[in-house]
Image (spheres, grey):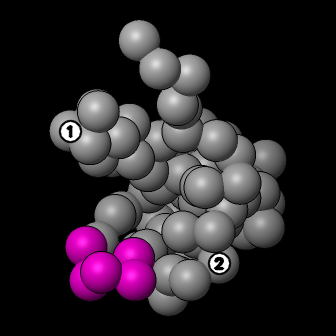
């Protein structure tokens, strides 16, 4: 088995080249991150806060993007496995 792997740099390069839009649904604590990758493939990350009193829109964006980033790890892992 080779030493090839998906790296944080690979993930960040994909996200740097991506178009990212956020939406926070009014009167909710739900935030989504729509990530269009350079090849046109789309990921949708999401977050939600249990308590409206504790909701922070910036944290919601960060968590939604983290959720999309986690999906990207799987996709790049799949791509790498096909290439090996």
Which of the pair 79/51 is nearer the observer? 79
Q: Is residue 4 magenta?
A: no
- Which residue is found at the position 25% from the left and 73% from the top? 41
Q: In the rendered view, tell whether residue 62 sits above or below residue 82.
A: below
Q: CA distance from mark 1 to mark 2?
A: 24 Å
Q: In the rendered view, tell whether residue 47 sits above or below residue 13.
A: above
Quarter that holds the N terminus: top left
Residue extending farthest to the front is 2
What element does badge 1 sit on? helix
Between discs 1 and 2, the one toward the N terminus? 2
Q: Quadrant of residue 58?
A: bottom right
Tag 1–tag 2 contact (CB < 8 Å): no
Q: Which residues are magenta?
A: 37-41
- Which residue is found at the position 71% from the left and 54% from the top? 9
Q: Residues within 10 Å of mark 1 (few under 14, many from 20)?
A: few
Q: Is residue 38 magenta?
A: yes
Check disc 1 and report the residue beneath it: 82
Instruction: Give how far across and how far down residue 78 sits, in percent.
Output: 28, 38
Check disc 2 and report the residue beneath it: 16
């Amino acid at each position: 088995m080779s030493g090839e792997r998906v790296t944080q740099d690979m993930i960040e390069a994909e996200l740097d080249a991506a178009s990212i839009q956020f939406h926070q649904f009014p009167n909710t604590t739900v935030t989504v991150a729509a990530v269009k990758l350079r090849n046109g493939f789309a990921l949708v990350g999401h977050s939600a806060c249990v308590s409206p009193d504790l909701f922070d829109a910036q944290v919601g964006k960060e968590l939604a993007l983290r959720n999309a980033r986690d999906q990207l790890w799987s996709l790049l892992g799949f791509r790498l496995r096909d290439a090996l």
